[in-house]
Image: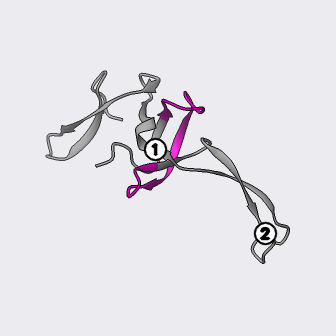
Amino acid sequence: MLRVKKNDRVQVVTGNERGKVGRVLRLLPGSSRVVVEGVNKRFKHVRRSQQNPQGGRLERENPIDVSNVMPYCESCQRGVRIRFAVGEDGTKHRVCAKHGGAL
């Protein structure tokens, strides 16, 4: 089970993009990678086609390993470890390991 989900805010903890905070756009669970908005941007050179009549360079986000991101806690203002807690109604949800609040 991955500790991040789509549309979660995460903070990058290692690499050239360390410290950046962004939203998870896509999960690639087979390869344990995530695509984060505004992180690890690269240029893709495209040839002319009907979809792209001018061709050129498209800048897009590439996946990074899920071990290099941490869920971002708004109240702590940083990436945090998470725990899973069971609520009164029996549902499991994620909580911040630092202060115990919901993410």
Q: Callout 2: few (<14), some (14-19), or many (20+) C-alpha neighbours within 10 Å? A: few
Point out which mark residue 65 bears: 1
Mark 1 residue type = Asp
Element under disc 1: strand
Mark 2 residue type = Arg
Q: Callout 1: few (<14), some (14-19), or many (20+) C-alpha neighbours within 10 Å? A: few
Which region of the structure is painted magenta? Answer: 11-33
Point out which mark residue 90 bears: none
Calculate the distance from the C-alpha at mark 1 to the C-alpha at mark 2.
29 Å
Residue in the foreground of this view, choosing between 40 and 3: 40
- In screen coordinates, is 46 left or right of 27? right
Residue at the spot 78% in from the left edge and 78% down from the top edge: 50
Residue in the foreground of this view, choosing between 95 and 71: 71
Residue 64 against residue 49 in the figure, above or below: above
How far across and down, in percent of the image, does residue 103 sit? 36, 35
Q: Is residue 59 magenta?
A: no
How far across and down, in percent of the image, does residue 38 sit? 62, 42
Q: How is the image coloured?
A: one colour
Residue at the spot 32% in from the left edge and 34% down from the top edge: 102
| Residue where numbered disc 2 is placed | 47
Residue 70 lies in quadrant: top left
Element under disc 2: loop
Residue at the bottom extreme of this rendering: 50
Residue 77 against residue 85 in the figure, above or below: above
